[in-house]
Image (cartoon, rainbow, N blue to C red):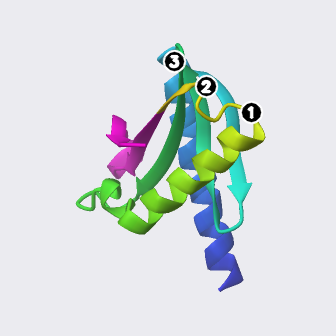
Amino acid sequence: MKNRSKNTRNKGHEAESIAASYLKRKGYEIIERNFTIRGGEIDIIARDGDVLVFVEVKSSRIPFIDPIEKVTRRKIVFLKRAAETYLYRKGLLDRINVRFDVITVTYGAGGNIQIKHIPNAFDY
């Protein structure tokens, strides 16, 4: 079980690195990765102009499964709570525009990687 968890974590970090590189190419500034609070983490925190963007990254190695389906209502509630914690700790609560994006990374045959970016995937 430990190996499976470690393998899943490594795949997750790989997808997050792909997503971070994608965002940088799009002109985003990566502020922080893997911001952790009790119960989980925010994968990427980035700046897009004057907007602070909290990014959830999901991946799949099974082509007919859309990774966006892994973003559950429970995960959204957690991400909002984690974002509030981050904003509070940084003294930014009610001082900055915030957005939640989702990036999916799907691994296909022959090393083909498909990235889908969903800006403003859900409201704050």
Position above or below: 57 against 62? above
* Mark 2 touches mark 1? (CB < 8 Å): yes
Part of the protein shown in magenta: 99-124
Q: Secondary structure at mark 3?
A: helix
**Splitting the image into 4 quarters, where does residue 103 fall?**
top left
Residue that mark 3 sits on: 25
Outermost residue on the front side: it is: 94
Q: CA distance from mark 1 to mark 3?
A: 28 Å
Q: Secondary structure at mark 1?
A: loop
In the depicted view, which residue is nearer to us: 111 or 13?
Answer: 13
Q: Main secondary structure of the magenta part?
A: strand
Residue that mark 1 sits on: 91
First of labels 1, 3 by sequence position: 3
Q: CA distance from mark 2 to mark 1?
A: 8 Å
Q: Position of residue 89 (x, y in %)?
A: 76, 42
Name the amino acid type tagged 3.
Arg
